Image (cartoon, grey):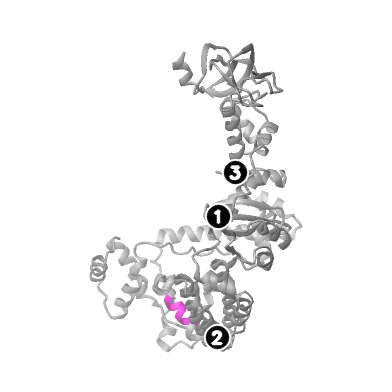
Amino acid sequence: MMEEASLLSLPEGMRVEQIQITEHGLVIAVEASHPTSCCPLCTQSSDSIKTHYRRTLRDAPCVGRQVQLILTVRKFYCRNPYCSQKVFTERLPSFVEPWARMTIRCCQHITSIGLATCGKGGARLAARLEIPTTRPTILRRIMALPDISGSSVVYLGIDDFSFRRGYRFGTILVNLESHRVVDLLPDRRAETAARWMYQQPDLAVISRDRGGEYASAAREGAPQAIQCADRFHVVKNLTEAVQVLLARCQAEILTEKKPDEPSQDEQNKPFISIEEWRPKIPAHIERVQRARRSERSARYEQAVELNRLGKPPQEIARILGVTGRTIQRWLKADTFPDAKRRRRRPGSFEIYASYVLSRWQAGERNGLAIYREIKEQGYDGSERTVYRYLEPLKQAEVRASIDVHRLQKWTANTAIWLFVRDPEKLDEIEREDLAAFCEASAPLKKAYDLLQDFLSMVHKREGQRLDAWLVRVAESELPELQSFAAGVEKDKDAVQAGLTWAINNGMVEGHVTKLKLIKRTMYGRAGFALLRQRVLHAV
């Protein structure tokens, strides 16, 4: 029966006596055959068998069938006259624990299912895998896992996470060397974090965000450690300051500067921007669009009339065959809601649009010649597409000039990306829009130079230039950036270390995202202790 024992991965000293196939699975009779066993109290070996007895165990499933083991084990006499344990039961530490009703590997399967899913979901998955178990058993196995939070930490990353967003927060602590979560704390108070850090005498570096609680905790609990402010959070704070400045300057620009009066030729010829430059809509599509607009207009008039008669929005929606939200939007607008024109989808022609426009403005009117030129540059579209784009140029003027008109399409939330992104990665239109901002406002030009210089400092990790940069900000007369610089001065050592060292909190943010996934699989009903076990032992 040695082949069967190897197939079932039984430990050495056990042999299979019988295998029986039943309606519910496999019943396997196994007998311990090692000639001796050690006393669990005095560890002396004995070969004096007193009696045999049977244990019924549940094992891991085999080929989709439940497995039940009928294990025959023995009791031995202890031959040590000084031992108080006169009779003992032989132990199988690698296979089953004393008094257990299932094997160790079956327990490990249940624990892994619980860590990967949750209590009720784990029980349903285990039933599919032919491992009958219950929700309390899965949770009990997870809670029985050993505590691993006592390991020594040298490089620590710390951040907060929310149990309930905006109401209650906890703290996650990550070993930046092993990339593992070492502990969770039930709150984000400085006292709790400082108490945990005090128990880590080997702490050398602490990576954190710009929050004052963790800075205070690091000073109190680990004064010997170097604090590193996370670069992402520093850049985020600077970006928010520039965004506020951008909103103020943009409002001033649009208030003070009015659009230039068009020339006589421009008044006679329609003007479209390069962003709105599209091929002329075919006549059959235009007829369909007009028909659809007439239908929408009729529905809108009916909705207004029914609302005047006192019908509620839901009933109007049912009568007209639209959604209630649509009716509410129509009535709120108080005017006919014309369909918005779709944004132009980027295609193969977009890259060459500026070149084609420049050739047209230079006097080239031969569409085939223009097509051949961009074909040599890598254009893979059709000749017909080029002709369709050239046709609107005969009736209207397409311009990509730098003027105040270009600023109106940007909000502070969107324009900030022109300032933050690498100038080499901006396309031609975005470069012209950025130039329009910088030419229209001297403070924005100054802020752009300071922002790009700081980003260069971050990318190259040139923390030694921080003092010179702060001096430039102090001389810039930009209150938004000076407010940011004042915050940096309060946490200058940590910011400078973060701009110099390679350490950052990116790994911690990744673990926070994983923690959120685990927390949501628990439906928010489990306590902190179970969440901590699942996060610490997550694979």
Q: Main secondary structure of the magenta part?
A: helix
Disc 3 and disc 2: Cα gap in Å? 48 Å
Q: Quadrant of the C terminus?
A: top right
Residue beneath label 2, please?
471
Question: Label 2 amino acid?
Answer: Val
Q: Residue at x 27, y 80 (%)?
A: 363
Q: Which mark is residue 510?
A: 1
What residue range appears in magenta?
431-437
- Pointer 3 local density, CA inside 10 Å: few below 14, some 14–19, many at least 20: some
Q: Residue at x 60, y 39 (%)?
A: 115
Q: Which mark is residue 87?
A: none
1 or 3: mark nearer the eye: 3
Question: Label 1 amino acid?
Answer: Gly
Question: Label 3 amino acid?
Answer: His
- Pointer 2 local density, CA inside 10 Å: few below 14, some 14–19, many at least 20: few
Residue ranking furthest to the right: 310
Residue beneath label 3, please?
537
Find residue 510 and report its horizontal and vertical position in percent: 55, 55
Nearer-N-terminus badge (2/1): 2
Determine contact: label 2, label 1, CB under 8 Å: no
